[in-house]
Amino acid sequence: MNKLLPTFFFLSGTATSLQAAGDGVSPSPYNLTEILGLPLTNSIVTTWAISIAFILFIRWAVGSPKLIPSKGQAVVESLIDGLRGLLEPIVGKKAFPMTFPLLIGLFIYILIHNWSGLIPGVGVFGHIDDHGHFSYWMRPANADLNSTFGMALVAMIAWLVISLKVAGPKFFIWELFGNKADKKETPAAIYMLLAPIFLMVGVIEVVSIAFRPVSLSFRLFGNVFGGENLLTSMTGMAPYIVPIPFYFYEVLVGVVQALIFTLLVAIYIGLMTNHDEEAH
């Protein structure tokens, strides 16, 4: 059978009834080809296509920034102001200038790629391989664990750099392993006994920090991948009308998961950088 045929098109943005009749959405992406020896998967193609389309759309909608904003510029500025009001109290004023580009980038990137599976053509076009399995050419980026894990690693590396730069290495180490008891108000003997306890708590905290990329990536991947399978099943059972409520549900889930990921990264940073009296 020719690998390029048949090509399927349905107005549903996530799956074909053929997939739903089979084993649902593949838990791993498909390799489409290789570039310089590196695999080019369907999730990478979707990432590039959606990101470029979004950048071009924003450039078209905003145009050249003006003192009296256009409608597109006003929408973008409202989004930025809203996120600024939400995130600045969490990370603190000192860390905010270097943290905000990371956080708003994460939020918008995750949001558009959470919604990318709802766009007609994503998870629809493809071919049947020699084994009779449908391989689609585009896959939502966040339905790929490689993508979410890589994004979580970047976020945690940024957390480490920002924390060390704003709080300093001395405070960073003390925050993890230091004795938090007030030396002036705590008896010396008790203060000394508390030192190894806080040291062990620091070790546990380091283990917790090491697992943050895992929890961040699996939470996002699980919700997006689960949503793809849900829409696949609903579309396979009844391709018209019935899946519509689930599409609205996935729109909401996309926003919530983008916000949760961004807020968690902001909280991790704020725990190290936001220690002024106002924050307490």
Image (spheres, rainbow, N blue to C red):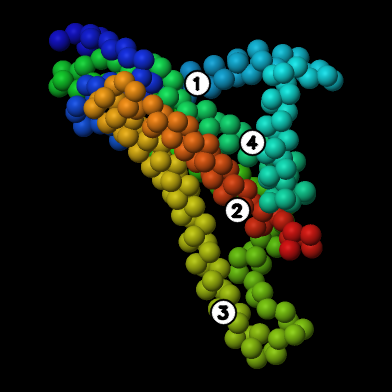
Disc 1 designates what residue? 50
Judge left or right: residue 195 versus residue 1: right
Where, by quadrant of the figure, is residue 143 drawn? top left
Judge left or right: residue 68 versus residue 179: right
Q: Is residue 97 above or below residue 170?
A: above
Across and down, in percent, residue 269 comes to 64, 51
Q: Nearer the viewer, residue 246 or 47?
A: 246
Name the kind of residue labelled 2 in the image: Tyr
Q: Is residue 189 above or below residue 3?
A: below
Disc 2 designates what residue? 268
* Residue at mark 3 to residue at mark 4: CA–CA distance: 39 Å
Residue drawn where x is 62% and y is 48% of the image? 266
* Residue at mark 2 to residue at mark 1: CA–CA distance: 29 Å
Q: Residues within 10 Å of mark 2 (few under 14, many from 20)?
A: some
* Residue at mark 4 to residue at mark 2: CA–CA distance: 15 Å
Toward the right, the furthest residue is: 67
Label 2's element? helix
Q: Nearer the viewer, residue 174 or 280?
A: 280
Disc number placed over residue 104 in the picture, else none: 4
Tell me which label, 2 or 1, sits earlier in the chain: 1
Q: Is residue 180 above or below residue 248?
A: below
Can you tell which of label 3 and label 4 is closer to the viewer?
4
Across and down, in percent, residue 117 comes to 41, 26
Disc 3 designates what residue? 196
Label 4's element? helix
* Residue at mark 2 to residue at mark 3: CA–CA distance: 24 Å
Count of numbered labels shown in the rendering: 4
Residue drawn where x is 58% and y is 36% of the image? 107
Across and down, in percent, residue 199 comes to 56, 73
Q: Residues within 10 Å of mark 3 (few under 14, many from 20)?
A: some
